[in-house]
Image: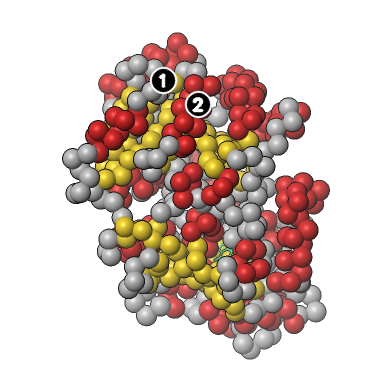
Amino acid sequence: PAHFIVFFIVSRLMSIIGKLRRSNNSLASEIHSPVIGSKLCYDLEAIGLASTDYGNIVQEIPSAVLYPTSIADIIKLIKFSNICPHPFNVAAQGHGHSVRGQAMAHKGVVVKMPSLKKYYENGNGIRVSTSGNYADVGGEQLWIDVLNTTLEHGLAPVSWTDYLYLTVGGTLSNAGISGQTFLYGPQISNVLEMDVITGKGDFMTCSKDKNSELFYAVLGGLGQFGIITRARIFLAKAPKRVKWMRMLYSDFSIFTRDQEHLISIEGLEYLEGSLMMDYTPANNWRSSFFSPSNESLITSLLKKHGILYCLDMVKYYDDETIKSVDKEVELLQEGLSYIPGFTFTRDETYVDFLNRVRRGELSLKSKGLWDVPHPWLNLFVPKSHIMDFNDGVFVDIIHRQKKSHGPLLVYPTTKTKWDDRMSAVTPDEDIFYCVGLLHSGSFDDWQDLDNQNNEILEFCDRAGIKMKQYLPHYKSKEDWIKHFGSKWNTFLERKAQFDPRMILSPGQKIFNSV
Ligand code: FAD
């Protein structure tokens, strides 16, 4: 209810202000450097904003916030930290859409990357190359702006996230996944070159051929090795419109068989999947696909089966392919075993399709339901265990407990499209499933959902499911070592090489456990 939300937000703010007043702001008294000290912001509002994120669960109070107006500002800050006897932590904060404080810096400095937009004369850090196959994009840029600018040239990146109000630097520090990943790889597989400020304050250009160790370290590197100030993103000709089909299944093995078939053949540009539970409405904030009449039809089907699985697939088209697209879609659907009659189609512009989650965001915001706790759990589950995962997690934990009200995503992707030299970690199988348990909690119950997440992780452990967390969150060094597995030593070596004083992105809690 609204009054709980207001109460929670006010008490959160009071607690931040209280903590701020009690702390004697060690950094403020420490930084006398004329080169950067005057650029740091200590006011309570800026510090309060840098202490929270989309997750609304973790709160870490920095000593100061930097609003950079040039790349040199960030270099000076990092170099200064390096020469301090006790270096302070530095966290780049993109759009702050992490859910566990990953972009926060306890007693350190948060660098608000979006302020770099002022660096560019026309306010736009996105330059499309005249040869037309890439764009040079500031790390602070939002993907929605990358889309809009590249479309002016009839071009667009090929690999996306479901939601576009995320920064380029933020998603490249993780991987950047969506329904296009099976075909084009994650966003990190579509980067040609980057400018990075390392943890030593060195400004370096890197690619597969130049400073390649830094290039591979930073992509999926959880912000540990450097701050991305520019990424060169691969572009292709943009389609104009999409045919978006959703088909319903009651049997998980048939659903996953059809998903795996679709990613193994040619012709599709996007494939995802999600779950509907009989205790939640057929439409959720992230996807209001069904018309009211279809919704009631689906509700009765849900009552019968308890859980339904939705397969979403998309075919792009433009003026040249408009006449053949329906036939192609028909061919793609041939041989699929969804529940007869339960297939739904939408025809949308490419932009509306890519920007689909924004509609849900605006609707939730209008109801005051966007800034609530989000105890999300994202996993990569190997194909060989996806049936066990369905039985143990979707059916036996989530459906039985009826706690989760957020979107539940499940779709396969292909390991060959990932580059194992990069820091991002995936399971050791050719096909693995991206699972997103995107819980929206209330201020009273998020802890229950978090307990459920722990139960899910324990179940996977017991069942021997060798999954990996995506957007990982761990509390102990042992868990991080297990997460990185055979990549851990390389991760350590790269940390020693590029951020030896361990100052970057402390909120990931890999090296800095304060
Ligand atoms: P932040 O939260 O600000 O930062 C994330 C991490 O990256 C931090 O460690 C930070 O220090 C570091 N960082 C930030 N900027 C830089 C930089 N320039 N250089 C180096 N390090 C940097 N992810 C997907 O893959 N697919 C999805 O479909 C998807 N959908 C989402 C939908 C919503 C509504 C939300 C809230 C998140 C979603 N995410 C998705 C997760 C998202 O990709 C990550 O949370 C991402 O980190 C958010 O970007 P940000 O700009 O907010 O990063």
- Is the residue indicated by label 2 positioned so its CB lies within 8 Å of ligand 1? no
User: Label for residue 257?
Assistant: 2
Mark 1 or mark 2: which comes first in sequence?
2
Quadrant of picture, ligand 1: bottom right
Name the residue beneath numbered marker 1.
Answer: 337
Residue 18 pos. (x, y %): 66, 58
Most extreme residue toward the front, as rendered?
265
Query: Tag 2's secondary structure?
Result: helix
User: Residue at horizontal 31%, vertical 18%?
Assistant: 341
Which is nearer the eye, 495 or 285?
Answer: 495
Q: Amino acid at mark 1?
A: Ser
Which is nearer the eye, 11 or 438?
Answer: 438
- Could you tell me how far apart the alpha carbons at marks 1 and 2 are, in whole angstroms? 9 Å
User: Residue at horizontal 72%, vertical 50%?
Assistant: 484
Residue 365 pos. (x, y %): 40, 45
User: Residue at horizontal 48%, vertical 59%?
Assistant: 190
Q: Amino acid at mark 2?
A: Arg
Q: Label 1 crowding class (10 Å Cα cut-off): few <14, some 14-19, many 20+?
A: some
501, above or below 274, in the image: below
